[in-house]
């Protein structure tokens, strides 16, 4: 009779433990493709005033304090630096080319574009080349995430870089050019603030209650035909609200 080997259970336990570990196989990206990444900004980047607000605006809807899609969150240092099962570290300090959040934001990982595309303008816009460059610079500079809570930082919202493209995408079909319906046009800040012949001024800088544009863009103005057709995504509406709150400049 062959004696029972007492060490076998320990090997079995070790084997089971190894299989239980996540597979940390990062999908390799060809160097030629990595060279197409937007370049990192050539200046120091501040986490509290630049990086964290970008995370909050672009990522918290799915990866914030209330929702952890894919068991990943970006509102805490521990969560943000997680090593993913399929794509390696989400954030690899001092090497943005090996950071999954950069590769996903650039669309380099199949079917993993982050933020994911939405169905309407402004609903889930991809990061711009400058924003990716900002994140790359932060990571390459060491990905420093300070201890303690991050204070709220109010980002400046302006018409030309932020609001105009949103309104043009949603409203220009009817409210642009010399034949703009109701005389209301989104072609420029001056024309937008002037209002139209039908409803007068719809934006009162600094006063959300008197700015009827918000009611229109929320799809709740029952005085206009098909109010729902004027509705824009909530994310975009919040941005217009903040622009008006800051003085509609």
Image (tube, rainbow, N blue to C red):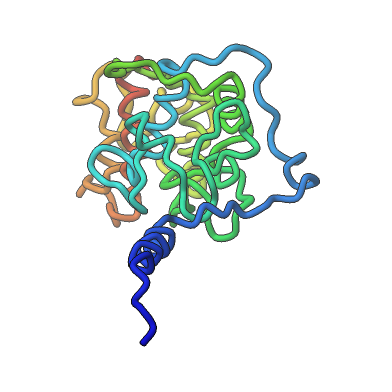
For this rendering, which residue is in front, 225 or 59? 59
111 shown above or below 176: below
For this rendering, which residue is in front, 198 or 53? 53
For this rendering, which residue is in front, 27 or 5? 5
| Left or right of residue 130, residue 226 in this image | left
Residue 225 position, x and y percent, is 29, 54
Residue positioned 33% across, 31% down in the render: 76
Q: Specify the quadrant that holds the N terminus.
A: bottom left
Q: Specify the quadrant that holds the C terminus.
A: top left
For this rendering, which residue is in front, 244 or 210? 244
Residue 54 picture quarter: top left
Residue positioned 33% across, 32% down in the render: 75
Residue 176 position, x and y percent, is 53, 40
Can residue 190 be seen here? Answer: no
Residue 208 position, x and y percent, is 23, 24
Residue 136 picture quarter: top right
Residue positioned 33% across, 16% down in the render: 147
């Amino acid at each position: 009779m062959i004696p029972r080997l007492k060490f076998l259970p320990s090997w079995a336990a070790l084997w089971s433990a190894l299989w239980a570990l996540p597979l940390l196989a990062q999908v390799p990206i060809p160097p030629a493709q990595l060279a197409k990444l937007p370049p990192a900004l050539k200046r120091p980047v501040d986490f509290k005033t630049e990086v964290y607000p970008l995370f909050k605006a672009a990522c918290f809807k799915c990866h914030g304090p209330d929702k952890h899609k894919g068991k990943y969150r970006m509102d805490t240092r521990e969560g943000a630096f997680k090593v993913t099962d399929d794509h390696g570290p989400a954030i690899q300090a001092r090497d943005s080319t090996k950071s999954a959040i950069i590769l996903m934001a650039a669309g380099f990982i199949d079917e993993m574009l982050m933020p994911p595309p939405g169905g309407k303008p402004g609903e889930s816009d991809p990061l711009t080349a400058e924003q990716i460059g900002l994140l790359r610079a932060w990571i390459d500079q060491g990905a420093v995430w300070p201890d303690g809570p991050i204070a709220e930082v109010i980002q400046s919202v302006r018409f030309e870089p932020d609001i105009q493209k949103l309104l043009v995408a949603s409203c220009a079909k009817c409210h642009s050019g010399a034949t703009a319906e109701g005389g209301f046009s989104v072609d420029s800040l001056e024309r937008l603030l002037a209002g139209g012949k039908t409803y007068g001024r719809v934006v009162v800088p600094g006063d959300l209650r008197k700015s009827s544009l918000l009611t229109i863009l929320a799809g709740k103005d029952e005085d206009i035909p098909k109010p729902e057709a004027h509705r824009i995504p909530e994310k975009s509406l919040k941005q217009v609200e903040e622009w008006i709150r800051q003085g509609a400049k």
